[in-house]
Image (tube, helix red, strand yellow):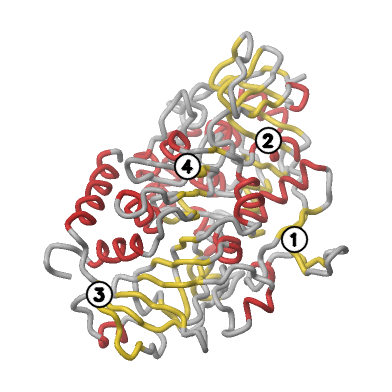
């Protein structure tokens, strides 16, 4: 992307904008952490950041390098144990937004972070596995996924369901007894996908400036549908870009 | 009452070939020095349990100590893949690795059940995931009160838990603080426990939010300053982020990894504690 910002920066800014001030957000490391910290530095100063390492209300002034970065515990409202995070905070439905990344995601928003190729016992590529994601995807009131859009990552059906989106389509979450509403948005480096309310299939409902439908089709592994008139997302403001780059610079400086 | 011994003696006495071993520490207080001592003493056929296998288990797996891994997330945090873990699963090197895979919530609850003397724990989890199909320590269960279907996970009761903490006193009472992870549960779920500590003090000064493990719940305490390195010990040491990054190229290749083992674990220049 031109005009002085990258598509990754646009993606992070779009994800930050999706977070509402005053809500609680269960944050994975990497892209979700960058976006939620950007939100807190811009329009959502009262966003409650919860990391699975046991910090509630972390307020880091630089990007944490891992979910166990000391700065999270030092700035948190409360530091608790791992069983408490999952059992007392996530499981009863106290978390507004679960914010996840993905290695592979399908048209129903199911996430695979377990294996690619071969079978489970003999995988071609062994990915890290589930971490906290299955229960974040199940029990957060809603879920936002942030992932770069490529043909390899965006597949018709995932090879292994690590975390459930809409399963096989309408009615699956209810049948499984999952209490959260499921994925609300997939935010990529091309735009934003939202689930069709009738089919639960993710469709491209917003595009970043200068992104063509052909590019989206080339980088999606299923026959992707578009909203009748996709919204064109405003580029990052200088305030957003400055805040994001300050965070990134502090991350580099502390490496 | 815990015995205060050297790390080498604690591992020699408490960790045996074929044991089920849980080294815990969730991103903070990871017992790296103890893990290295297990490699140095060439333990074999271990079932290694850990929520986040991390670089420490990459080293143990690559060194051939493990027969089986029980885990929920196997990556190098903030860096990428665990190459020794992947090589063992994808290619069976240096030996095939059986896996038992869970989510974090499932693993945490398995330790809670083990510490509570219960055969299983119940949670809302795994429904609709592939994990419920491939892992036989996850089973659906019907709530006797509401009829709701929930998920049961089998308790973890390791032979030995190994953790790192800030302090112990001369009676072996242990105090740790900061991100406390799942260490209390891991120690109380296990038959034996080794705790390495930054320092041994005359008297523990109570701290808010600290986890205190009485000496009679711990088998061995060993003083190992910086024993969590490259992880960190809140109040004592900083996380060595460069080590995690440097690990990637070392672990990527069997030969460089074997060279690392020879130099840093088995060699004369290795740091023995």
Q: Residues within 10 Å of mark 2 (few under 14, many from 20)?
A: many
Assign the N terminus of chain A to one quadrant of the image. Answer: bottom left
Q: Are marks 2 and 3 in contact (CB under 8 Å)?
A: no
- Do badges 1 and 2 share one subunit? yes
- In the image, residue B37 lies at what x, y percent? 57, 32
* SS of the residue under disc 2: helix
- In the image, residue A108 lies at what x, y percent? 51, 80
- Cα separation, mark 4 vs mark 3, equals 33 Å
* SS of the residue under disc 1: loop
* SS of the residue under disc 3: strand
- In the image, residue A136 lies at what x, y percent? 56, 61
Q: Residues within 10 Å of mark 4 (few under 14, many from 20)?
A: many
Q: Residues within 10 Å of mark 3 (few under 14, many from 20)?
A: many
- The residue labelled by disc 4 is A68
Residue ranking furthest to the right: B144
On residue B137, the disc is: 1
- Cα separation, mark 2 vs mark 3, equals 48 Å
- Do badges 4 and 3 share one subunit? yes
Residue drawn 46% across the image and 61% down it: A99
Taking A109 as reference, is A99 above or below it? above
- The residue labelled by disc 2 is B184
- Do badges 1 and 3 share one subunit? no
Question: Going from the N terminus, do you reach mark 4 or mark 3 first?
Answer: 4
Q: Residues within 10 Å of mark 1 (few under 14, many from 20)?
A: some
- The residue labelled by disc 3 is A208
Q: Is residue B83 visible?
A: no
Chain identity of mark 3: A
């Amino acid at each position: 992307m031109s005009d002085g910002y990258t598509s990754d920066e646009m993606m992070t800014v779009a994800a930050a904008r999706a977070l509402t001030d005053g809500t609680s957000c269960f944050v994975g490391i990497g892209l979700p952490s960058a976006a939620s910290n950007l939100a807190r530095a811009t329009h959502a100063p009262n966003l409650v950041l919860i990391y699975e390492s046991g910090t509630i209300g972390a307020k880091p002034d630089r990007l944490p390098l891992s979910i166990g970065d000391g700065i999270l515990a030092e700035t948190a409202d409360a530091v608790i144990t791992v069983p408490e995070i999952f059992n007392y905070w996530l499981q009863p439905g106290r978390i507004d937004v679960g914010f996840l990344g993905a290695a592979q995601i399908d048209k129903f928003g199911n996430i695979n972070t377990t294996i690619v190729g071969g079978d489970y016992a003999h995988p071609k590529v062994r990915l890290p596995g589930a971490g906290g994601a299955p229960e974040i995807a199940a029990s957060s009131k809603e879920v936002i996924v942030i992932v770069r859009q490529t043909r390899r990552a965006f597949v018709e059906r995932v090879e292994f369901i690590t975390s459930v989106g809409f399963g096989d389509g309408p009615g699956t979450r209810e049948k499984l007894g999952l209490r959260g509403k499921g994925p609300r948005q997939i935010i990529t480096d091309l735009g934003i996908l939202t689930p069709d309310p009738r089919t639960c299939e993710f469709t491209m409902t917003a595009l970043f400036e200068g992104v063509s439908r052909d590019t989206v089709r080339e980088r999606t592994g299923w026959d992707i549908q578009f909203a009748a008139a996709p919204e064109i997302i405003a580029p990052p403001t200088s305030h957003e870009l400055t805040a994001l780059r300050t965070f990134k610079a502090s991350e580099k400086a502390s490496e | 009452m815990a015995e205060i011994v050297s790390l080498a003696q604690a591992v020699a006495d408490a960790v045996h070939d074929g044991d089920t071993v849980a080294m815990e520490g969730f991103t903070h207080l990871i017992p790296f020095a103890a893990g290295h001592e297990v490699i140095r003493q060439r333990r074999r056929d271990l079932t290694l349990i850990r929520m986040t296998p991390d670089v420490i288990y990459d080293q143990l797996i690559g060194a051939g100590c493990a027969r089986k891994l029980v885990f929920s997330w196997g990556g190098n945090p903030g860096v990428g893949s665990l190459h020794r873990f992947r090589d063992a699963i994808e290619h069976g090197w240096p030996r095939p690795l059986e896996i038992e895979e869970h989510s974090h919530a499932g693993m945490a609850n398995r330790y809670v059940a083990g510490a509570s003397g219960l055969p299983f724990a119940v949670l809302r989890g795994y429904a609709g995931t592939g994990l419920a199909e491939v892992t036989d320590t996850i089973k659906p269960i019907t709530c006797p009160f509401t009829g709701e279907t929930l998920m049961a996970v089998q308790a973890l009761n390791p032979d030995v838990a190994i953790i790192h903490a800030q302090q112990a006193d001369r009676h072996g009472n242990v105090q740790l603080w900061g991100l406390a992870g799942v260490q209390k549960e891991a120690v109380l779920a296990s038959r034996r426990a080794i705790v390495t500590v930054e320092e041994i003090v005359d008297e523990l000064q109570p701290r808010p939010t600290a986890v205190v493990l009485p000496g009679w719940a711990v088998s061995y305490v060993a003083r190992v300053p910086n024993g969590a390195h490259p992880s960190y010990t809140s109040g004592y040491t900083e996380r060595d982020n460069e080590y995690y990054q440097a690990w990637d190229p070392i672990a990527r290749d069997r030969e460089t990894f074997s060279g690392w083992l020879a130099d840093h674990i088995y060699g004369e220049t290795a740091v023995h504690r």
